[in-house]
Amino acid sequence: MPENPFLKALYRWRVRTAFFAFLFVLVLAEPTVVSIGVGILISLAGLAVRTWASGHLRKDKSLAVSGPYRYTRNPLYLGNFILGISLSVGSHSLWVGAVFAVYFLMFYPAIVHVERERMKTLFPGEYDAYRRFVPLFFPFRRPLRGRGAPFSWKLYARNREYRALIGTAVFWAVMAVKLLLHLPSPF
């Protein structure tokens, strides 16, 4: 955990705040058939990135450098970013886009910082070498050489990644119900 009290507070409040942001999204959303369809397609890309990453992640046991970790040091967060875009698109609301942007810009720099410091502590030297070759977030360089460990469905299950799939499915079900009931946003 970081020594900086501000980072500690952000890190601690990220999940609680996400819950309230999610409620705002549900209220502010004005989905259409097209926005839901496009949003679902985008969310499948986000879920695919998260699935791929979780199948290569051995938390606190070894530094993940295979699969999507060859392209970005934070593929789970990249998957979350894509999911956030999908919720914004599917909600068909600029307000939802604003809520997502504020949440992401407020919390993810702190989360990434905490994660980086944790990796430096767990895997000193190895993480510094990895960090020199793999971008922080957006995969804009050639991938790190080597294949590393293969994807594992057991790791996917152990990392409980199915929760992202369930949460995403629940969100789209709620959006579909809101569309069918024609519930307008109060704003």
Image (tube, rainbow, N blue to C red):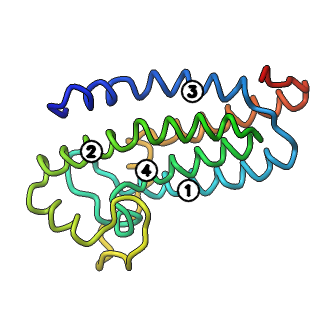
Q: CA distance from mark 4 to mark 2?
A: 14 Å
Q: What's the residue type where badge 1 is placed?
A: Ala
Name the spot of residue 94 as percent of width and height, x first. Answer: 71, 40
- Residues at badges 3 and 4 in contact (C-beta under 8 Å)? no
- Which one is nearer the viewer's eye here, 170 or 31? 31
Q: Is 180 above or below relative to 49?
A: above
> Of 149 and 177, which appears nearest the observer?
177
State which mark lies toward you, 1 or 2.
2
Q: Amino acid at mark 3?
A: Ala
Query: Distance from label 1 to label 4 (Cα)?
Result: 10 Å
- Residue holding disc 1: 48
Numbered circle sitting on residue 21: 3
* Mark 3 nearby-residue class (10 Å; few <14, some 14–19, many ≥20): some
The structure residue drawn at horizontal position 33% and vertical position 66%, both measured from the top left corner, is 135
The span from disc 1 to disc 2 (Cα, nearest Å) is 24 Å
Q: Quadrant of residue 132?
A: bottom left
Question: Which badge, 1 or 3, comes first in the chain's sequence?
Answer: 3
Q: Residue 106: x, y in percent? A: 42, 36
* Mark closest to the chain's N terminus, 1 or 2: 1
In the image, residue 149 above or below residue 59: below
Q: Position of residue 179 (x, y in %)?
A: 86, 32
- In primary-sequence order, the first of circles 1 and 4 is 1
- Check residue 113 in the rendering and tell me which mark sits there, or answer none: 2
Name the secondary structure under disc 2: helix
Q: Which mark is residue 76?
A: 4
**Element under disc 3:** helix
Q: Are marks 2 and 3 in contact (CB under 8 Å)?
A: no
Q: Could you say which is closer to the camera, residue 21 or residue 57?
A: 21
